[in-house]
Image (tube, helix red, strand yellow):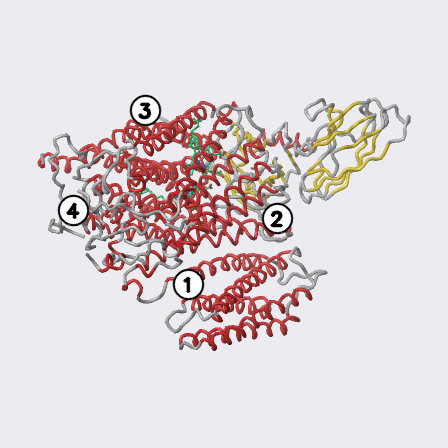
């Protein structure tokens, strides 16, 4: 009889509903990074490749275009929107900071700290989305206005969708946090959600530099 | 000699249909995967028979070109995305946790979600047939042909949505496999003791996690082009027609390794067991698998040689190079059989069928790596021959081998060996009759994806042979269906380890209890069950 | 028995190689053409053909060797009836062997690669001073061949695939384009194909070396009638080419009977009735209307608008069905263009109107 076999005797009979059965595996596998966090890192890797596909399309189309942004009767210049986009960037970066503060709080076992920080994070995220929608409404072109329009709205739109998904995740964490489900030892979901939020932030910084600053 | 004490297993908390619909047990999900994929194999096969029937003679006798184009498009889409990929994922699901001594996958509920996305996606894709026509641009769906202007109709949109869902299912599945393999191994199961099948699933999962999202992004851009006036792919609106090919093949070349690596893994499990020898060059297999995965990302433009827009020598060289790790595997498989005591069970026959037929598919693929030769054979039936020698001669033979091999583990009964051998012989003959003449047709200049050809072209006879062959293949599937049916009802009951196998799944009962193991043998090598059966005193050299 | 095995092991490679040699020599000696491309009819194609032979022979050797090893091992090492149940020697591997069977394939593929690359440079070479230039344009689902220096244009029609006429032994430079989706220009006898991609011009040379007619076909799937997108290449002597060119120039674009000299055909009693105006637009490879009607025995003035940039369309009118007898065939015009057709008066009945280029564009004309 080995250690693994001993661990297995603890299997609950109706355990089918248990989401995380990793506790059944041996200690040595549990050392290091936890399953949800590893899963999230891999998920983020796939998301990176998803955006890589969209970015590749952007660069490909841009490099083939004779002038960029295209000229004509539609105004494609994004520089006038630099101020609002910059403001949005500051909000999203700040939200990443507050998110990290929340994570540090729960690592210390500070539940109210987590709740407070994540509330601010969510508010900033919602404001970001609202600001982005406002920015859209002031742009003079649509998704069907040539390659500039399609790449711009696809890139920023899918980023926005990811912010939205991140907000849902943070919302669940906040809900579970107020219910006191996390502790200094047990907060993998918080780690995973914060990783995702940072990722969303990084994508935005790339988009901001590329679309608004470089133009 | 069985290695486990037979303990009466579970007390079922739930039963029947509801249980299957809500299960999060990797074994049940694995069987669901296998079953649904097999149904899609039959659907894809019937579509293939329609294609072959039309091609048997010149003239459009049975269908118009509009239907033909839908049929071959959906034939490939179903076979690749709803049959081969999920089928192999099904084996992975069933076997990987057992092989590494884990109680389940890392995320059982996500696992269930991965599965249920597939029938949903399949239904969405096929819905096109009833809503004015399915997608009909070929499984590669080249743009601008696939844009709304040239392919109006909802069929292509449904195809896109279905494929995005399948991709999501694959990505979630891939993440699940990776976390399971990295984190849930039993004590003693180090990375270099993992069965080769687990290694191939690992590398496949990496390809899925890094490749499939790129396909998703391409599909989304196509959807935007089609429905929201986007301009990604149509040069008429400032897009780039070759962009689609680049992003599509960036995924779809690695995808062909997604479709073969687990098959190679299955073969690598079967051959040692029925040769009564350890796998020759275990570490070489690991490195070769990783090399194929890595090289797989650097050859996508070999599908674009004739566009005149890629740097040909680079992609030619990388494509040639892939022959090397694949060759290493071949020689190691042969060395495993060398001086063994080979038992020709049905599973082993399919494994040998894999070796002999995938070899042809690999070599005729290497012809395409030689760019000028590809100029001659690209988009002809030579390529159709290549596709089927690798995918049917490779993946499908491996899949049948795997079904015969693990059936007793899944259901406690063996499939009938005689019926299995009959199936193998008929299938092998029919397969070669169908697809070998296609080499010749390709060289004669018959392009693929044509609904009709001129009687003057001189392609009639070989096409007739291919059509006859395809019906022989169809007939060979019947003994299998019968075999499953009779074996489940009254198959030969066997012990936990009927093949005297090597890997951990044979250390538990057949079928295994809900959390797989009541006890685990000690793991000191990549053959824990062999070690337990024979003691560890046997002389081991090399390694 | 072990002695036998050893003997076999030593003898096997020799035997396999001998078998391969026998098969290959037999194949070459008897001129058997199993798995051979058609004899190349261009100089570039000849280079590819040579390369193909090399790849084929190496492929065949690898195939026979590996297949032979698999079959030999299966047969020789099968479990015998009198098996004593002991385990065979448990060999786990050999680093020496691994290195050998890694290095040898690398050497083979490196050799193949270098030879392919050299041949590629021959096949892909583009001459700065070609003897003849042709612009080839693919569109759904026909080809157009333009000889810019000769002022000749040939457009394929559904019932008459176009013919590319070229002089033998001259370097012909092709600029390949597409007006809509991707097509593929493929002539099996040249062992060559190249894609016609919208928004991009592909340039390649070929030098036909045999006189004769060679069939060609589109190889990139391009929609409904992809299978029917055929053409011929007719290679003629230089003198014949000159004669053909002179004649082709004299009879401009061989479009079907032109209706332009109004009233030249048909029973329209001239001046009897004022023509009735009708309108029809082609857009997105479809007509905007599928039903038209006109009064009996009155000439029709059809204003036809082709709104598809770069895509050719026309209107042709047939008795009863698109397959029926043609009563009027309008010029094919490439969009974006407007064309006025004068259609002679028609007797009462039902007619089908259809685009000669795109048979899927159909509608019904009712004359009452
Ligand atoms: C399971 C799927 C699978 C697998 C494993 C492969 C494997 C390979 N494929 Fe294939 N391929 C497809 C599925 C697959 N392919 C499909 C579906 C298409 C068509 C897509 C479409 O357009 O619809 C395609 C198309 C395709 C093309 C494009 C052809 C064209 O459209 O013009 C090319 C070009 O290079 C190619 C090459 C190769 C090569 C070199 C390998 C190699 O990996 C093979 C390596 C194996 C061996 C070579 C045999 C064993 C090796 C030895 C015994 C060592 C010694 C050998 C030598 C020295 C040569 N494939
Ligand atoms: C795993 C992948 C896979 C598999 C298994 C198959 C299996 C088969 N394929 Fe397919 N095929 C592809 C992948 C696959 N194919 C791909 C990727 C393409 C390219 C498509 C493109 O160009 O876009 C293609 C294209 C393709 C073509 C070229 C079409 C064209 O270019 O116009 C043809 C033509 O013969 C063909 C034939 C067949 C046949 C006869 C089988 C058979 O082996 C099928 C055998 C199965 C059955 C027959 C069904 C089961 C039997 C029953 C249900 C029993 C009852 C029925 C009777 C007794 C009648 N396939
Ligand atoms: Cu044009 Cu196919
Ligand atoms: Cu490929």
Q: Is residue B480 above or below residue B137?
A: above
What element does badge 1 sit on?
Answer: helix
Asked if the beta carbon under badge 3 is closer than 8 A to the nearest atom of ligand 1, the reply is no
Label whose residue precedes the other's in the sequence (2 or 4):
2
Residue B419 horizontal side relative to residue C289, left or right: left
The answer, for residue C71, to whether it is visible in the render is: yes
Q: Nearer the viewer, residue B278 or C124?
A: B278
Question: How far apart are the two marked residues, 3 and 1, measured between alpha carbons?
Answer: 63 Å
Residue position marked by numbered label 4 in the rendering: B533
Q: Chain of mark 2?
A: B
- Which element is circle 2 on? helix
The CA distance from mark 1 to mark 4 is: 40 Å
Quarter of the rendering containing residue B348: top left
Q: Are marks 3 and 1 on the same chain?
A: no
The residue identified by callout 3 is: C30
Is residue B371 positioned above or below C14 on the image? below
| In the displayed structure image, the side of residue C28 where residue A111 appears, left or right | right
C-alpha gap between disc 4 and disc 3 = 57 Å
Give the number of the mark in front: 3 or 1.
1
| Residues beneath discs 4 and 3 located on the same chain | no
Q: Are marks 1 and 4 on the same chain?
A: no
Task: Name the element at disc 4.
Answer: helix
Residue under label 2:
B226
**Residue A213 in the image: x percent, y percent?**
58, 70
Residue A10 in the image: state x and y as whole percent: 29, 58
Quarter of the rendering occupied by the N terminus of chain A: bottom left
- Give the residue drawn at x 42%, y 26%: B471
Location of the C terminus of chain A by quadrant is: bottom right
In the image, the residue with mark 1 has its CB under 8 Å from the nearest atom of ligand 4: no
Chain letter, disc 4 residue: B
């Amino acid at each position: 009889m080995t250690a693994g076999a001993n661990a297995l005797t603890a299997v609950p009979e109706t355990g089918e509903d248990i989401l995380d059965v990793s506790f059944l595996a041996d200690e040595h596998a549990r050392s290091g990074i936890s399953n949800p966090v590893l899963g999230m890192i891999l998920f983020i890797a796939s998301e990176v490749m998803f955006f890589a596909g969209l970015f590749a399309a952007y660069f490909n189309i841009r490099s083939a275009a004779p002038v960029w942004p295209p000229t004509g009767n539609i105004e494609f210049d994004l520089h006038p929107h630099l101020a609002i986009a910059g403001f949005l960037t500051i909000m999203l970066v700040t939200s990443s900071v507050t998110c990290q503060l929340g994570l540090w709080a729960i690592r210390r076992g500070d539940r109210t700290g987590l709740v407070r920080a994540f509330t601010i994070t969510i508010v900033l995220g919602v404001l970001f989305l609202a600001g982005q929608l406002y920015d859209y409404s002031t742009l003079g072109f649509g998704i069907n206005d040539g390659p500039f329009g399609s790449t711009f709205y696809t890139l920023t739109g899918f980023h926005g969708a990811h912010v939205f998904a991140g907000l849902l995740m943070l919302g669940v964490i906040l809900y579970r946090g107020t219910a006191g489900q996390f502790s200094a030892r047990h907060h993998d979901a918080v780690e995973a959600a914060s990783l995702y939020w940072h990722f969303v932030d990084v994508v935005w910084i790339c988009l901001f530099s590329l679309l608004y600053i470089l133009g | 000699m069985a290695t486990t004490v037979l303990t009466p297993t579970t007390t079922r908390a739930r039963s029947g249909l509801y249980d299957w619909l809500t299960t999060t047990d990797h074994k049940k999900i694995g069987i669901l995967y296998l079953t649904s994929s097999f149904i899609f194999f039959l659907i894809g096969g019937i579509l293939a028979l329609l294609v072959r029937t039309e091609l048997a003679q010149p003239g459009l006798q049975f269908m118009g070109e509009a239907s033909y184009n839908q049929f071959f498009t959906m034939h490939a889409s179903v076979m690749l995305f709803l049959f081969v990929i999920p089928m192999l994922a099904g084996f992975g699901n069933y076997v990987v946790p057992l092989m590494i001594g884990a109680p389940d996958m890392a995320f059982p509920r996500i696992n269930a979600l991965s599965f249920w996305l597939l029938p949903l996606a399949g239904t969405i894709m096929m819905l096109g047939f009833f809503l004015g026509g399915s997608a009909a641009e070929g499984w590669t769906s080249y743009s601008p042909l696939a844009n709304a202007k040239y392919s109006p109709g909802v069929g292509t949109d449904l195809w896109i949505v279905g494929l995005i869902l399948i991709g999501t299912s694959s990505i979630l599945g891939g993440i699940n496999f990776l976390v399971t393999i990295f984190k849930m191994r039993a004590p003693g199961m180090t990375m270099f003791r993992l069965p080769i099948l687990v290694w191939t699933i690992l590398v496949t999962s990496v390809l899925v996690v890094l490749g499939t999202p790129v396909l998703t992004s391409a599909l989304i851009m196509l959807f935007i082009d089609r429905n929201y006036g986007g301009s990604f792919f149509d040069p008429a609106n400032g897009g780039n027609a070759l962009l689609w090919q680049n992003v599509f093949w960036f995924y779809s070349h690695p995808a062909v390794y997604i479709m073969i690596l687990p098959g190679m893994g299955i073969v690598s499990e079967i051959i040692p067991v029925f040769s009564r020898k350890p796998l020759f060059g275990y570490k070489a297999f690991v490195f070769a698998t990783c090399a194929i995965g890595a090289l797989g990302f650097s050859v996508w433009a070999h599908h674009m040689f004739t566009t005149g827009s890629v740097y040909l020598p680079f992609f030619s060289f990388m494509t040639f190079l892939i022959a090397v790790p694949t060759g290493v595997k071949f020689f190691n498989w042969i060395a495993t059989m060398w001086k063994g005591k080979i038992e020709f069970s049905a599973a082993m026959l399919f494994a040998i069928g894999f070796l002999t037929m995938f070899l042809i598919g690999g070599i005729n693929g290497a012809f395409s790596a030689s760019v000028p030769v590809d100029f001659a054979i690209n988009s002809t039936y030579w390529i159709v021959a290549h596709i089927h020698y690798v995918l049917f001669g490779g993946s499908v033979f491996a899949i049948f081998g795997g079904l015969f091999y693990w059936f007793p583990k899944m259901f406690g009964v063996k499939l009938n060996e005689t019926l299995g051998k009959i199936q193998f012989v008929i299938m092998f003959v029919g397969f070669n009759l169908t697809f070998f003449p296609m080499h010749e047709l390709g060289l004669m200049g018959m392009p693929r994806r044509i609904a009709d050809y001129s009687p003057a072209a001189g392609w009639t006879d070989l096409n007739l042979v291919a059509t006859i062959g395809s019906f022989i293949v169809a007939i060979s599937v019947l003994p299998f269906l019968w075999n499953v049916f009779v074996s489940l009802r009254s198959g030969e009951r066997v012990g936990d380890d009927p093949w005297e196998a090597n890997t951990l799944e044979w250390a538990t009962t057949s079928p295994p209890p809900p959390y797989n193991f009541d006890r685990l043998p000690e793991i000191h090598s990549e053959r824990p069950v062999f070690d337990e059966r024979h003691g560890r005193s046997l002389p081991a050299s090399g390694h | 028995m072990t002695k036998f095995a050893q003997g076999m092991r030593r003898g096997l490679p020799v035997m396999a190689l001998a078998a391969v040699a026998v098969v290959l020599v037999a194949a070459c000696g008897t001129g058997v053409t199993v798995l051979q491309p058609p004899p190349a009819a261009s100089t570039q194609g000849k280079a590819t053909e040579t390369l193909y032979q090399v790849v084929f022979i190496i492929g065949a050797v690898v195939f026979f060797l590996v297949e032979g090893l698999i079959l030999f091992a299966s047969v020789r090492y099968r479990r015998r009836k009198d098996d004593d149940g002991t385990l065979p020697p448990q060999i786990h591997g050999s680093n020496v062997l691994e290195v050998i069977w890694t290095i040898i394939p690398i050497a083979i593929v490196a050799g193949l690669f270098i030879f392919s690359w050299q041949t590629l440079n021959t096949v892909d070479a583009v001459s700065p001073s070609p003897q003849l230039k042709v612009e080839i344009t693919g569109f759904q689902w026909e080809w157009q061949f333009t000889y810019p220096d000769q002022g000749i244009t040939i457009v394929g029609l559904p019932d008459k695939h176009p013919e590319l006429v070229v002089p033998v032994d001259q370097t012909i430079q092709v600029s390949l384009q597409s007006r809509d989706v991707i097509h593929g220009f493929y002539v099996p006898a040249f062992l060559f194909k190249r894609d016609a991609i919208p928004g991009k011009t592909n340039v390649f040379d070929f030098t036909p070396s045999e006189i004769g007619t060679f069939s060609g076909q589109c190889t990139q799937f391009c929609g409904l009638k992809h299978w029917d997108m055929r053409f011929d290449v007719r290679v003629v002597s230089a003198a014949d080419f000159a004669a053909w060119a002179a004649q082709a120039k004299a009879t401009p674009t061989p479009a079907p009977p032109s209706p332009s000299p109004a009233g030249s055909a048909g029973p329209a009693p001239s001046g009897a009735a004022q023509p009735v105006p009708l309108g029809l637009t082609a857009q997105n490879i479809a007509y905007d209307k599928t039903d038209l009607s006109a009064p009996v025995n009155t000439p029709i003035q059809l204003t036809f608008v082709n709104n598809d940039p770069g895509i050719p369309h026309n209107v042709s009118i047939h008795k009863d069905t698109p397959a029926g007898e043609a009563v009027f065939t309008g010029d094919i015009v490439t969009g974006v263009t407007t064309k006025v057709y004068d259609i002679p008066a028609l007797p009462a009945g039902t007619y089908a109107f259809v685009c000669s280029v795109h048979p899927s564009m159909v509608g019904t004309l009712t004359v009452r």
